[in-house]
Image (tube, rainbow, N blue to C red):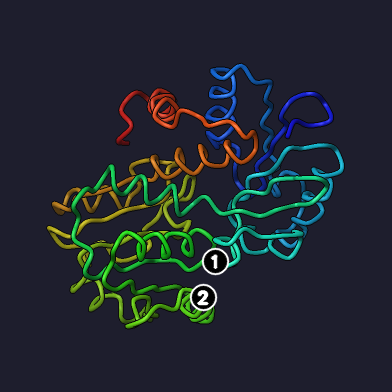
Amino acid sequence: MTSKLGRYVVGLIGTGIGTSLSPALHEREADELGLRYAYQLLDLDELGLAPDQVGELVNEARRTGFAGLNITHPCKQTVVGHLDELSGVANVLGAVNTVVFTAGRAVGHNTDGYGFAEGFVRGLPGAPMAHVVLLGAGGAGAAVARALVELGAGRVTIVDVEPGRVERLVAALDRPHRTVVAGATDELPELVRTADGLVNATPVGMAPNGGLPLAADLLRPGMWVADIIYRPLRTELLRYAHERGCPTLHGGAMVVFQAAEAFRLFTGRAPDADRMYRHFVALTGGSGDG
């Protein structure tokens, strides 16, 4: 729905989001569709707010007539308690990346899994998936775990520095035959040694801090490596993986396709996702591959 201002006003809540491409992606597509659309960044760091104060921003956005909000790290799980309703997927995952204001109610959705799946099918077609190691059980990790199962992974082993978070996610995604299982950080060498692929769904590697979510020497030729980070596209993890002969997938497609689905939820209009991806490529320097 349009806002009280006669246009679609949406925003992004998170920390360190100053370089986010979401405003450009959403606003350019809105221009193509002839919509009046404004996308605002609500950075918790700049606003002096803690993640557990995300509800204050949700309520203020609702009060002032926003059409909706995107939610990113570190609020995808924290925001759940401040919403009136969750979609089926968001309820299963316990994580929200999109909030739509409808008839005064704040409804949470999760488009991250859709975004990851679309990017994976396009970027790593036919990749083996008998065993996938997933780093990170936060909001993004939850969506990626579910997407991996739906893509046909035989087993997904989730590793996180907070074991309790892994156990909760495994319980939420319980499947017959233990498709989704918990792994410990000290088991990573053996887990990676037997894995077909590895997905990083942690913020480790994101600009400006960089870094690696695991020891580079654990990567081996032939295994595929995906990173959901898109700032930068070529993270240290992907750079090392490429040097070791691993097929790689950056987070660009995921961010575009989750944005396209969020745009549809905000406006009720179907965006051209391929056009949005072409715009993303232009914004990131014309290569799209980092």
Kindly indicate the quadrant of the structure image that contains residue 244.
bottom left
Q: Tally the numbered discs.
A: 2
Q: Amino acid at mark 1?
A: Leu
Name the spot of residue 70 as percent of width and height, x first.
63, 45
Residue, disc 1 = 93
- Give the residue at x 30% y 28%: 287
- Give the residue at x 82% y 26%: 5
Question: Which quadrant holds the N terminus?
Answer: top right
Asked whether, in this view, residue 278 is left or right of residue 171, the answer is left
Name the spot of residue 81 as percent of width and height, x first.
73, 65
1 and 2 marks in contact (CB < 8 Å): yes
Cα–Cα span, label 1 and label 2: 7 Å
Q: Eyeballing the image, is 140 above or below 242?
A: below
Number of the label disc, if any, that sits on residue 24 = none
- Give the residue at x 37% y 76%: 180
Which mark sits nearer the N-terminus, 1 or 2?
1
Residue, disc 2 = 172
Q: Nearer the viewer, residue 221 or 65?
A: 65
